[in-house]
């Protein structure tokens, strides 16, 4: 039995943040009922068609869920949702600012009607303040939190290549809901919680935030190198392949000089015998490292780094990561069914000793509408009528 079996989650979700939170609950056995717009569904279904004709975002975020279509602008649709919520444990929404309130499902109303319900709202900037009605997309939150200002090269600020603001918000929503479930077990009462993308990603800005606030200047944009540690980042081997490495302490620096550079005298050079000095003289040190590395292949350098017990990595493409030998040996891939056929998916990163996560199918739009409505006592003729008038 999975830990969250018996827990029902209802979502008014779209895009990434809320679907990421609810999918993780589904991975642990929760029943997730995803309420979608009739016909089109979650707009993330149409971001691309890379996964056998399906959106790569949607495939990633929506396995193990049931899809019901409801037009919540119509009274019949609202009544159906209320009926489902009356038996739910968790309600998650990340609609645009104010939308859920206008539909009549604001947290004050819901907690009065359903005191057992855990209500989680995910937004860009939070439920009050001058930015509360401002639209928020991942790139824009990366800009507002300062992520883009410290990412990229000195000449070009850049966003992270994945949706880190959405992912951060989804992770905190997930952990917050689990916390609320534990609290309800103790008290019998639901909770209202909110997660903003700004504040979630702001938490991830911890080190640059303190560095800037108390150090008096922002960390510099240094590409794939580290702004405050050296050597840490990419170096070019003689075969024109990049090797990434990071030296964290003086013991590693000594090993690097002796084993990798084969220059033991360098470890006591007063220009480089602390991280602060190595950072201040990084240009000079880079010339020394490059002069050795240009005569070695990437594999030789990595072999020496391994011998010296210094952290290192290849620069993998995404496809190379898909085929990563560590994922294969640890059996991290599973087959997941979808409307487009069988797809491969990584299992969740938390590995339990005796628990296999749910890896159930990705739903088509409204695939479970009829079965859910019948479960809640709505007969076939009424369902047909709802379809005719566009409620479903």
Image (spheres, rainbow, N blue to C red):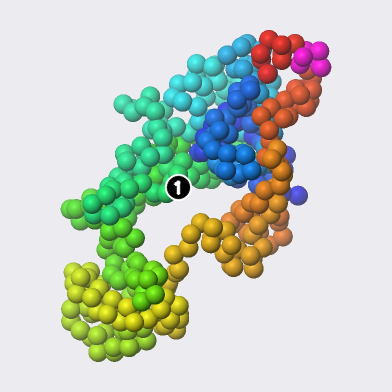
Q: Which residue appears at 50% of the width and 27% of the height?
A: 95
Q: Is residue 264 above or below residue 66?
A: below
**Label 1 crowd (10 A; few <14 / some 14-19 / many >=20):** few
Which one is nearer the viewer's eye here, 73 or 131?
73
Q: Is residue 352 above or below residue 68?
A: below
Q: Which residue appears at 64% of the width and 68% of the height?
A: 329
Q: Is residue 114 above or below residue 359?
A: above
* Residue 318 seen in render: yes
Q: Mark 1 falls on what kind of element? A: loop
Q: Which residue appears at 22% of the width and 78% of the height?
A: 272
Which one is nearer the viewer's eye here, 251 or 263?
263
Q: Position of residue 101 (x, y in %)?
A: 50, 19
Which one is nearer the viewer's eye here, 309 or 174?
309
Q: Is residue 114 magenta?
A: no
Which image quarter: residue 319? Answer: bottom right
Q: Position of residue 171 (x, y in %)?
A: 51, 45
Quick check: 114 left or right of 367? left
Q: Is residue 382 magenta?
A: yes
Tell me which segment is drawn in magenta.
Answer: 379-384
Residue placed furthest toward the right? 380
Which image quarter: residue 311? Answer: bottom left
Which image quarter: residue 262? Answer: bottom left
Q: Main secondary structure of the magenta part?
A: helix
Q: Position of residue 225 (x, y in %)?
A: 31, 63
Query: Dot 1 corresponds to which residue?
Result: 162
Q: Position of residue 38 (x, y in %)?
A: 63, 21
């Amino acid at each position: 039995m999975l830990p969250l079996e018996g827990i029902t989650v209802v979502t008014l979700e779209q895009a990434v943040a809320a679907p990421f939170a609810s999918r993780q609950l589904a991975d642990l056995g929760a029943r997730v009922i995803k309420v979608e717009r009739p016909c089109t569904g979650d707009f993330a279904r149409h971001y691309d068609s890379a996964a056998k004709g399906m959106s790569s975002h949607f495939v990633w975020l929506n396995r193990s869920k049931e899809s019901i279509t409801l037009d919540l602008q119509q009274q019949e649709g609202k009544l159906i949702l209320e009926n489902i919520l009356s038996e739910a444990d968790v309600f998650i929404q990340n609609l645009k600012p104010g939308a859920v309130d206008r539909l009549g499902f604001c947290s004050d109303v819901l907690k009065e009607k359903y005191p057992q319900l855990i209500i989680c709202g995910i937004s860009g900037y939070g439920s009050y303040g001058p930015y509360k009605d401002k639209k928020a997309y991942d790139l824009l939150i990366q800009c507002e939190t300062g992520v883009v200002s410290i990412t990229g090269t000195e000449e070009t600020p850049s966003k992270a290549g994945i949706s880190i603001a959405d992912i951060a918000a989804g992770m905190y929503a997930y952990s917050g809901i689990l916390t609320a479930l534990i609290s309800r077990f103790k008290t019998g009462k639901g909770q209202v919680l909110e997660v903003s993308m700004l504040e979630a990603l702001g938490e991830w800005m911890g080190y640059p935030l303190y560095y800037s606030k108390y150090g008096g200047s922002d960390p510099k944009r240094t590409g794939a190198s580290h702004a405050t540690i050296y050597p840490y980042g990419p170096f070019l081997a003689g075969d024109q392949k990049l090797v990434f490495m990071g030296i964290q302490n003086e013991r590693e620096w000594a090993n690097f000089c002796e084993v990798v550079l084969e220059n033991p005298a360098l470890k006591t050079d007063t220009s480089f015998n602390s991280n602060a000095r190595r950072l201040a003289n990084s240009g000079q040190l880079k010339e020394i490292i490059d002069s050795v590395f240009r005569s070695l292949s990437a594999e030789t350098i990595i072999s020496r780094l391994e011998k010296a017990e210094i952290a290192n990595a290849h620069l993998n493409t995404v496809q190379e990561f898909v085929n990563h030998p560590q994922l294969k040996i640890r059996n991290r891939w599973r087959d997941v069914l979808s409307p487009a056929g069988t797809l491969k998916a990584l299992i969740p990163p938390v590995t339990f000793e005796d628990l296999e996560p749910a890896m159930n199918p990705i739903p088509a739009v409204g695939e479970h509408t009829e079965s859910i409505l019948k479960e809640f006592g709505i007969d076939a003729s009424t369902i047909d009528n709802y379809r005719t008038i566009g409620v479903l």
